[in-house]
Every structure is written in C-alpha cells, then in structure tokens.
Amino acid sequence: MRFMMLMIPGGYESAGPELDLPVDDVEKMMAYNQSLVDAGILRGAEGLHPPAVGKRVSFKGGKPLITDGPFAESKEALGGFWIIEVGSLEEATAWAARCPAQENEVIEIRRLQEMEDFSSEVQEVARGLDLEGSGWSRA
C-alpha cells in the first residue's frame, strides 16, 4: 500500500515567498528522509513553495477562475509530502511519528488510490492511461 504523508506547517498559509530554513532542522529532516530510503519504503518526497507564490484554479459555475496566492481564506497549507510504500496505515503512522517535525507542524496520512481499489468498470475506463510509477499505469 502506498501512503502520502502530507506536511502541514502552522503559519505556512501566510508565509512569504522566501525560503530560509534553519540548517540544523534541514539536517534532521534529511536524516529522517535517509531512514525512509534505508528502509526501502520511500517512493517520493518533495517540498512545496509557500502559497504566496502559487495560484488556485476554481470552477465555480463551471468556468475556471484563477486566484493568485496567498489565499486569505486558507487556514492551513501543505509544505511538502512523502510517498511511502508500507504494509498498513499503522506502519505509515509509525513512520510519520518518527519525523523530526516542529511543534507547529502536523502530518496527515492518506492512502493513495490504486487501480485495484476500483470496480472493473472503472478500471476499464482508465485502461491505457500510462502514468509511469503510479498505481494508475495500465497497458
């Protein structure tokens, strides 16, 4: 099973565009990331720039509406993510609990949808989509 661990740092929703991270915090996070690699479970990990330099596309009324960040109505924002492959939600939770996160950070854990989770009818509609390395690759 693949899980996405979503890092939600408090205050990131209103952070400016600059990226100035404490080196010692980055060192701790890189050691944690290396432990995921060493365990053979890390499938991907990325940090995200703050919402201040992002955009949102909403579809109210069926038409795209583009909004520049930051987004005043946001109460929290994603700061990054890991994709891990483990045997259960409990195992994913145990890995998330080992993260050297700060007091104002939260990790949300969500299982990724795999093709096998869906009915044969849905699988047939999606057949042929080729997203290399995802659970949606179907030939």
Image (cartoon, grey):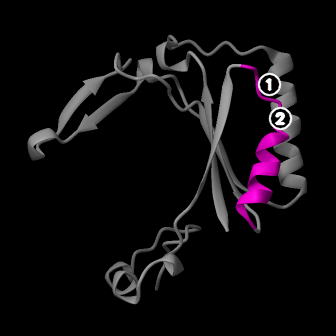
Q: Position of residue 25 (x, y in %)?
A: 81, 21
The kind of residue tagged 1 is Val
Residue 54 lies in the magenta stretch: no
Report the residue at 48% width, 72% height from top: 136
Instruction: State the extent of the magenta-drawn residues as a range.
Output: 88-103
Q: Position of residue 6 (x, y in %)?
A: 61, 41
Residue 73: quarter of image: top left
Q: Position of residue 119 (x, y in %)?
A: 41, 84
Element on which disc 1 rests: helix
Residue position for label 1: 26
State yes or no: discs 2 and 1 in contact (Cβ < 8 Å). Answer: yes
Residue 81: quarter of image: top right
Element on which disc 2 rests: helix
Report the residue at 23% width, 38% height from top: 58
The kind of residue tagged 2 is Met
36 vs 120: above or below: above
CA–CA distance in space, label 2 to label 1:
6 Å
Report the residue at 18% width, 42% height from top: 59
Residue position for label 2: 30
Q: Nearer the viewer, residue 139 or 69?
A: 69
The quarter of the rendered structure image containing the N terminus is bottom right
Res 129 label: none
50 vs 63: above or below: above
